[in-house]
Image: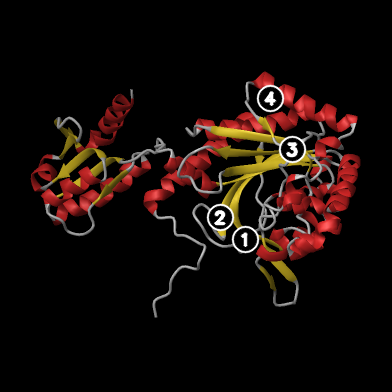
């Protein structure tokens, strides 16, 4: 029986893996510049973490989680997002007691959501995310947004649009919540079942509904900006001022809400304005969460972060025809002629690799012409030909594949000569 890959997952073949590796290296390098440190958390957690951390009124918890019982009956869930796990680790490992605050962390890893697969959206997908926990300074909000914008721009994406909003502090959100309940209550029966159940629990989720997005009540729903207190207004104004001074263009969208329960104050998304990218133009989203650490059993420690999909990033790069500067090829390919040369080639390969030179050879018995074609196809910078005559004379024929220049080099000097040639080629 032929077994196929599960729906919503993908094999990333060697031809594409280098693109992933380049993007991941860029994320590591950028976070190093911004002084964020990598954290790695389990792929599965206790289900309660996401019910409490993500919110039991969200689509993620209600419809999309991969949840199962282990052999002792404990409910576990494949992580659908990264923030809750990072905050759980922050609390459990008492990172709030570290001398350096805030704790500036980042992660790269697979997440799992049971949703309808489509272009750029998979059931298993990889997120790059950043969390800064332990500061309520608006300058770190601007820093996190700047990091996200830098990441996309340095990879070569154009026509990006940053959208920001303020969801207000607890007092402001409470006032806005009451206003939303009063607004939607008269038309409650006209809304979908999800919105009806969310209206009392978390009415902000109603504004994010895809089913009722065209309902007239959505267009007239009270804006959070009418209910921001002075503290929330000042905070948001500071974030906007910082972005202006950093030269980061943005739009304020009062209707922007994030899909998770723990957000407050600053919320943001980065979108791409590109024809042919598809109906879903959002590349990433993030925001501030000032109560999540306490919700998961820790002290009062505000945080802010974002998460983005590597799959959607790759789709955006493809749509804009951005070619990543992925390094192809190898340093040298050994062409061997005859049984003795074949053995010598195997030993020489090991020595070249130990010296830091990337090298390979044929393992399928190809003739010399086929081996040279293989060296060309694999984009070898140099070919090294070993035959009976070369072995007798203790030399190897070294050929620069680009120029065709050839040179006979003593075998005992081969590594030294080849290393020098590779250095000269890079200059």
Q: Nearer the viewer, residue 154 or 36?
A: 154
- The residues tagged by marks 1 and 2 sit, at their Cα atoms, a distance apart of 8 Å
Left or right, 229 with respect to 223, comes to: right
Asked whether the beta carbons under mark 1 and mark 3 sit within 8 Å of each other, the answer is: no
What's the mark number on residue 254? 3
Residue farthest toward the top in the current orientation of the protein: 245
Task: Say if residue 46 shows up in the picture.
Answer: no
Q: What secondary structure is marked by label 3? A: loop
Left or right, 218 with respect to 2, comes to: right
Q: How many marks?
A: 4
- Looking at the rendered image, the quarter that the C terminus falls into is top left
Q: Nearer the viewer, residue 303 or 366?
A: 303
> In the picture shown, does residue 421 fall above or below 256?
above
Q: Residue at x 59, y 44 (%)?
A: 282
Crowd around label 4: few <14 · some 14–19 · many ≥20 (10 Å): some
Disc nearest the viewer among 3 and 2: 3
Asked whether the beta carbons under mark 1 and mark 2 sit within 8 Å of each other, the answer is: yes
Q: Nearer the viewer, residue 64 or 355?
A: 64
Asked whether the beta carbons under mark 3 and mark 2 sit within 8 Å of each other, the answer is: no
Disc nearest the viewer among 2 and 4: 4
Residue tagged 4:
243
Task: Say if residue 155 shows up in the picture.
Answer: yes
What's the mark number on residue 125? 2
- The residues tagged by marks 2 and 4 sit, at their Cα atoms, a distance apart of 30 Å
Q: Nearer the viewer, residue 242 or 101?
A: 242
Residue tagged 1:
113
Mark closer to the chain start, 2 or 4: 2
Residue farthest toward the bottom in the current orientation of the protein: 1
Mark closer to the chain start, 1 or 3: 1
């Amino acid at each position: 029986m032929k077994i196929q890959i599960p729906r919503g997952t993908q094999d990333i073949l060697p031809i594409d893996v280098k693109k992933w590796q380049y993007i991941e290296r860029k994320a590591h390098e950028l976070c190093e510049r911004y002084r964020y440190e990598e954290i790695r958390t389990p792929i599965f957690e206790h289900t309660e973490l996401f019910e409490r951390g993500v919110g039991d009124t969200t689509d993620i918890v209600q419809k999309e989680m991969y949840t199962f019982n282990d052999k002792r009956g404990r409910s576990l869930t494949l992580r659908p997002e990264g923030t809750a796990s990072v905050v759980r680790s922050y609390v459990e490992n008492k990172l709030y007691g570290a001398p350096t605050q805030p704790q500036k962390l980042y992660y790269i890893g697979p997440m799992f959501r049971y949703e309808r697969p489509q272009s750029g959206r998979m059931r298993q997908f990889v997120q790059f995310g950043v969390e800064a926990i332990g500061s309520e300074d608006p300058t770190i909000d601007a820093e996190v947004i700047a990091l996200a914008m830098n990441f996309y721009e340095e990879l070569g994406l154009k026509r990006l649009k940053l959208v920001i909003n303020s969801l207000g502090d607890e007092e402001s959100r409470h006032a806005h919540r009451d206003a939303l309940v009063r607004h939607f209550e008269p038309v409650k029966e006209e809304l979908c079942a999800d919105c009806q159940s969310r209206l009392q629990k978390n009415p902000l989720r109603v504004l994010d509904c895809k089913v009722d997005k065209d309902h007239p009540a959505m267009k007239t729903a009270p804006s959070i900006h009418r209910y921001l207190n002075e503290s929330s207004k000042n905070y948001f104004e500071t974030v906007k001022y910082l972005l202006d001074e950093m030269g980061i263009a943005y739009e304020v969208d009062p209707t922007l809400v994030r899909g998770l329960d723990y957000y407050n104050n600053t919320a943001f998304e980065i979108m791409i304005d590109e024809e042919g990218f598809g109906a879903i133009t959002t590349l990433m989203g993030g925001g501030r969460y000032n109560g999540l650490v306490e919700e998961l059993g820790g002290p009062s420690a505000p945080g802010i972060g974002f998460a983005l999909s590597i799959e959607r990033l790759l789709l955006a790069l493809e749509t804009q025809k951005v070619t990543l500067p992925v390094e192809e090829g190898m340093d040298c390919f050994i062409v061997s002629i005859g049984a003795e040369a074949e053995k010598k080639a195997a030993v020489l390969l090991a020595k070249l690799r130990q010296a830091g030179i990337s090298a390979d050879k044929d393992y399928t018995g190809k003739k010399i012409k086929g081996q040279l074609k293989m060296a060309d196809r694999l984009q070898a910078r140099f070919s090294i030909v070993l035959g009976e005559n070369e072995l007798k004379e203790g030399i190897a024929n070294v050929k620069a594949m680009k120029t065709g220049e050839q040179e006979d080099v003593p075998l005992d000097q081969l590594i030294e000569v080849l290393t020098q040639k590779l250095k000269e080629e890079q200059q």
